[in-house]
Amino acid sequence: MGSLALFSVPGCQTLSRGRTQHIPATSRPAGVKVLVNGTAVGETPINLKLTRRDIHVVRIELAGYRPVEIRVTKTGRYLESA
């Protein structure tokens, strides 16, 4: 099974940047199903628009690959969970 997605997260964030953050999600192959907090939001490549205040769980799924969940924290950092 291979890796499905690459997330690019901006580093330093301030209140002046607004209440949302944009996180691009890409994959090889393209067309991987993307869910945010359990809700399908589209397929890769996609630009996710997430609120900065909340913790989000981004899940990527494709038949033949193990699903991957990534927790995006309030600071914009992310952690992959098994």
Image (tube, rainbow, N blue to C red):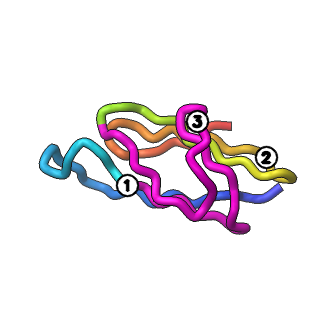
Residue 37 occupies quadrant: top right
Which residue, given by chain and number where applicable, does mark 2 sit on? 66
Which secondary structure lies at badge 3? strand
User: Marks 1 and 2: CB-CB under 8 Å?
Assistant: no
Instruction: Please report the bounds of the magenta region as a residue range.
Output: 23-52
Q: Closer to the N terminus: mark 2 or mark 3?
A: 3
Task: Identify the residue at image location x=68%, y=66%.
Answer: 30
Q: CA distance from mark 1 to mark 2?
A: 25 Å
Which residue, given by chain and number where applicable, does mark 3 sit on? 39
Q: Please name the amino acid that badge 1 sits on.
A: His
Which residue, given by chain and number where applicable, does mark 1 sit on? 22
Which secondary structure lies at badge 1? strand
Dividing the image into 4 quarters, which one contains the N terminus? bottom right
Task: Identify the residue at image location x=73%, y=67%.
Answer: 29
Q: Is residue 29 left or right of residue 6?
A: right
Extreme residue toward the right, this view: 64
Q: Closer to the N terminus: mark 1 or mark 3?
A: 1
Q: CA distance from mark 2 to mark 3?
A: 18 Å
Q: Please name the amino acid that badge 3 sits on.
A: Thr
Task: Identify the residue at image location x=34%, y=36%.
Answer: 74
Which secondary structure lies at badge 2? loop
Question: Percent position (x, y) of residue 13?
Answer: 23, 50
Residue 28 sits inside the magenta stretch = yes
- Above or below residue 42? Residue 28 is below
Extreme residue toward the left, this view: 16
Q: CA distance from mark 1 to mark 3?
A: 17 Å
Please count the marks in the image: 3
